[in-house]
Amino acid sequence: MRWINWHLSRRDRLIAGGAPILLLLVFYLITAVQRHAANPSDKIFPLPSGMAKAITDLLTTPDPLSGNLVFWADTFASLQRLGLGLGIATLFALILGLLIGALPPVRAALSPLVTGIAVIPPIALLPILFIALGLGETSKVVLIAIGVAPVMVRDIAAHVGSLPREQIIKAETLGANSWQIIARVALPQAMPRLLQAIRLALGPAWVFLISAEAVASDIGLGYRIFLVRRYLSMDVIIPYVAWIALLAILMDVTLAAISKRAFPWAHGDGR
Amino acid sequence: MNALLQLKNVWVEYGDKVVLEKVNLQVAEGAFLSIIGPSGAGKSSLLRLILGQEAPTRGKILLDGEPLTPQCGPDRGVVFQRYSVFPHMTVLGNVTFGLECPAAPFAARLFGAARRKAEAQATEMLEAVGLADSLHLYPAQMSGGMQQRLAIAQALIKRPRILLLDEPFGALDPGIRADMHGLITRLWRDYALTVVMVTHDIKEAFTLGTRVLALDKRRHDPHAPHRYGATAVYDLPLRGPPVPAPEPEAAPQPATAAS
């Protein structure tokens, strides 16, 4: 059978997908055990027991300075920044994307600006943001928003702009004005795409979050990773990275599920 | 003959490419005008003109004696070959939308009693095209023929002065097409419609139309083929608005026959 026609059953897919991950974990464990056999105080490849201990400390022992449980405080701070940044970007994407995509004059006026902002590497703006907005929460949230919004705006605008011309004409012959076409024809059809755009923006958003936290912060997942790097604390870094990955996957799966539930017509079968 | 739609010396040019030249046309109220012609002869351009999607480069178009504004409006309904229905609305929503637009300019939707009234009216329209059993399906769940029925119902709910059909049955298989011919003939008679239909199926043009218009280029310059546009080369009145005997319409297919 040609590989191109070789579709796996659900069980086989699980096995095929799990095998590389399992292999990697086994490889890590073997290396870690070997290194610890040679040097019991090895810090580069911590054993699971070491990681569990380090994380339990962060989970249960309050920070002597702030009194917070560090792990949860970091998670909360990071998620708040990520959520605010993505939320602002989403709002911009929806409003600007719809207007740029649907209305030619708005497209003519704003499309060059959005394209211009989109080509600036957001990290290059970080110093400007720190200088203009200070080192607090605002600059971090704004970095995420500026980082992901232009791409999202352009994606939504392109999607709305590529709606079949026939649909727009049809709506006009039904007596719809520009606002009604945006509200009833363009907006609903942009929503599944918006959720898709948020999913794709999650990756860059995390990059900008960790960058901003690494440069100037006193709390957050990225801050903690870069802080303990000084002590070679791989037993904290690795669980933190895994936790970030888990959070990202959860968000992605949630968004996909929302889209499927809320917009059944956009996912093949309409039921 | 009271001309509902008049085209007076209409030209359509894109740059130095002439698509339509010197088109003069009068369409009487109640007519079923079929427009045929080879590919690229400007059939769709002519339809877009009447629809208001484009303005003529030269000449005048009058609807009910009034010059046509080059914008689509509710006095002209349209059914395209594809993409005529909104994929994100149910069948009922697709038809109700046409009633909501004039009634709710800001909210863009109706609520409560007004909504129930509009939905009742839409349901009645959908019964007339044989979609009474499919009110809550999405277009993607229906066959091509049912989607075109929906598109027709959607256009007719506005009681347009003219119904424009752009190869509406071109993508349908022959059996379904025959059903649709029966349906459109019945609707044309029941609602006293004026229909302009573009088709490349000559048999369809003569079966349905009361008048057949053939577009083609009269002259052809082999060195500059784009310099001459198409115009009406044949204009065949077949029968007057007195309506032909209705064809028996086959039952619409069940809702489960989604393609």
Image (spheres, coloured by chain):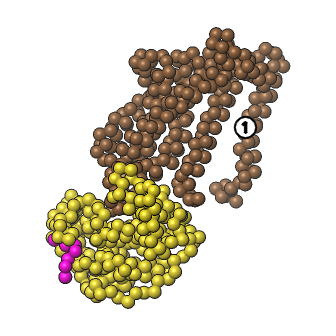
Give the x, y percent position of residue B46: 26, 69
Which residue is rendered at x = 70% and y = 19% of the image?
A: A58
- Which color has been applied to chain B in this rendered view? yellow
| Residue A123 in the image: above or below residue A131 | below
Which residue is label 1 attached to?
A21
Chain label for disc 1:
A
Seen at 59% across and 21% down, the residue is A220
> Which quadrant holds residue A67?
top right
Amino acid carrying label 1: it is: Ile
The reply, left or right, for residue B116 in relation to residue A222 is left
Magenta residues?
B1-8
Which residue is drawn at the image coordinates 23% and 79% (left, top)? B28
Decide whether the magenta segment is chiefly helix, strand or loop: strand
- Could you say which chain is coloured brown in the image? A
Q: Quadrant of the C terminus of chain B?
A: bottom right
**In the image shown, does A213 or B65 lie closer to the viewer?**
B65
